[in-house]
Image (spheres, rainbow, N blue to C red):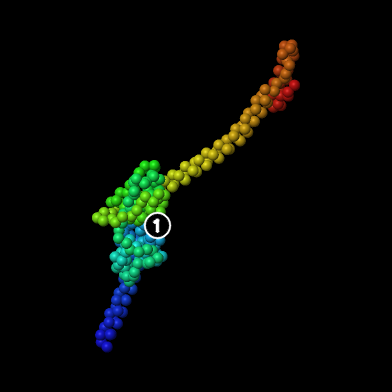
Amino acid sequence: MTDALLILSGALALGLGLRSARSDAKKLDPRVLAARIDALLPQTQCGKCGYPGCQPYAEAIVRGEADINQCPPGGAAGIARLARLLHREIKPLSAAHGVEQPRAVALIEENLCIGCTLCIQACPVDAIVGAPKQMHTVVTSLCTGCALCLPPCPVDCIRMVPAGSNAYDADDARERFRQRNLRLERERREKAARLAAKTAAAGQAAEDPKKALIAAAIERARRQKEQVRPQNVADLSPGAQAAIAAIEARRAAAGVPPEET
C-alpha cells in the first residue's frame, strides 16, 4: 500500500512538474522560443514537416499549429530534443510526414544532365551549381539531403546516395536558406518593378498618339487663323492696299478676327 502511494505521489509530482515547465515555456517571447526550437532542427529545409523550412515549422510549433513529431530528418532523436526543450511527452514520428531514414546526399549523373537548371531552382540551400545548357553538379558538403531536386528533373539524372562521412553544417545551411530567400524576394520585387514600368510605358505609348493628334489639330487651327488675310490684293493700287491694311489693323486692335476673302 505504501509503495503504491509513493508511486502515485511521484507520478503526480512529475505531472505537476511538467505542467509547470510547460507554463514557463509559454511565458517566453515567441520569437525566442521559436529560435530555440529552430536551433534543434536539422536545417534540411525539406518541407516534409508540412512547412516551407525549419524556421516556419518552429514558429508553427510555438503557435500550437504543429506538433513536435513532424520532422523525419530529425527522427526520434530530434523529437526527444524538442520534448525536453518544451517539457512535453516524447511521441513517435508522425507516419503522415514520412519515415526516418539514413542521411543521404544528391548525386547528378553528369553525362545525362541537359542543363535545364530546374534542380538549381529547387535547391533550398544553393548546393547545386551550373549554367543553362551546361552540366550541373552537387556540392556534396552543402547538400542537406532534402531531395527537392529529384521531382523537377526531366531526365531523372539525379539520385540520392548514402552521405557517408559527408556532413553539412546546420548553421551554414540555415544561413544559406535565409540568404536564398532574401535573394528570391529581391528578384521578385525587381521583376514586379520591371513589369510595372513596362506596363506604364505601354500605356504612355498608347496615350501619346492621341495627345499628338490633338496637339497637331490645335496647331493647324492656330496657323490657319494667323494666315487668314485679304486675298488677291497684289494688283491693287498702293492706296487701296494701305486702306485695307488700316482696316485690318483696326479690326485687330478691336479683337475682331480677320475674315477670309
Q: Is residue 17 above or below residue 157?
A: below
In the rendering, at what x and y percent does residue 78 appear? 30, 64
Q: Quadrant of residue 93?
A: bottom left
- Left or right, 32 with respect to 242, comes to left
- Left or right, 116 with respect to 20, comes to right
**Which residue ends up furthest to the bottom in the rendered image?**
1
Position of the C terminus, as image quadrant, is top right
Badge count: 1
Foreground pick, 50 / 116: 116
Mark 1 lies on residue:
52
Label 1: few (<14), some or many (≥20) within 10 Å?
Answer: few
Q: Can residue 181 be seen from the camera position used here?
A: no
Give me the residue at 32% from left, 51% from top: 107
Q: Is residue 107 above or below residue 76?
A: above
In the rendering, at what x and y percent does residue 81 appear? 29, 65
Q: Is residue 181 above or below residue 81?
A: above
Q: Quadrant of residue 164?
A: bottom left
Give me the residue at 72% from left, 13% from top: 234
Q: Can residue 10 be seen from the camera position used here?
A: yes
Q: Is residue 153 above or below residue 61?
A: above
Foreground pick, 212 / 95: 95
In the rendering, at what x and y percent does residue 256 appear? 71, 26
Position of the N terminus, as image quadrant, is bottom left
Foreground pick, 188 / 115: 115
Give me the residue at 73% from left, 15% from top: 233
Give me the residue at 64% from left, 30% from top: 217
The secondary structure type at the circle numbered 1 is loop
Q: Amino acid at mark 1?
A: Pro
In the rendering, at what x and y percent does residue 205 appear? 55, 36
